[in-house]
Image (cartoon, helix red, strand yellow):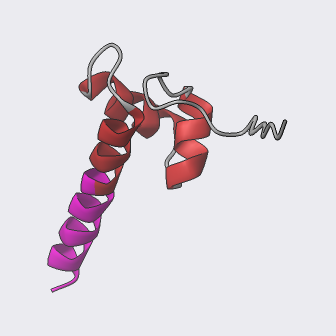
């Protein structure tokens, strides 16, 4: 039998822990907490990852707008 154990990977239906989510996306803890809170009580990890990407894109767009 060939069993593979991947402790670092969580199933998509398991909610993120705030610190691991913040670390993965380069966010501060309060921002990560806000993004996770905005996605609801137990969203999928993919939905949270998409929300983090959208947040980072919005921040980058805002920063570009401010430098003009």
The quadrant of the picture occupied by the N terminus is top right
Q: Percent from the top left, x then y, of residue 2?
A: 82, 41
Residue 18, image quadrant:
top right
Give the side of residue 3 with respect to residue 51, left or right.
right
9 falls in the magenta region: no
Instruction: Judge whether 4 appears above or below 54 on screen.
Output: above
Q: Position of residue 11 (x, y in %)?
A: 53, 30
Left or right side of 2 for 30: left
Q: Residue furthest top?
A: 41
In the rendered image, the quadrant that contains the C terminus is bottom left
> Residue 57 appears at what percent x and percent y?
26, 64
Q: Is residue 47 left or right of residue 14?
A: left
Residue 12 lies in quadrant: top left
- The residue nearer to you, when weighing 30 against 47, is 47
Seen at 33% across and 35% down, the residue is 35
From the image, give the main secondary structure of the stretch colored magenta: helix
The span picked out in magenta is 54-68
Of residues 16 and 34, the one nearer the viewer is: 16
Q: Residue at x 27, y 61 (%)?
A: 59
* Image height of 25 relative to 8, above or below: below
- Is 18 in front, or is 12? 12
Q: How many marks?
A: 0
Q: Does the magenta run of residues contain 55?
A: yes
Q: Is residue 38 left or right of residue 1?
A: left
Q: Residue at x 28, y 44 (%)?
A: 51
> Residue placed farthest to the right in the image?
1
Which residue sits furthest bottom?
A: 68
Q: Nearer the viewer, residue 3 or 29?
A: 3
Rendered location of residue 19, percent (x, y) = 61, 33
- In this view, 60 is above or below 15: below
């Amino acid at each position: 039998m060939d069993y593979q154990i991947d402790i670092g990977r969580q199933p998509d239906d398991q909610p993120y822990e705030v610190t691991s989510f913040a670390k993965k996306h380069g966010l501060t803890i309060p921002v990560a907490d806000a993004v996770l809170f905005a996605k609801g009580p137990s969203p999928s990890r993919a939905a949270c990852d998409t929300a983090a990407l959208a947040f980072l894109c919005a921040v980058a767009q805002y920063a570009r707008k401010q430098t003009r």
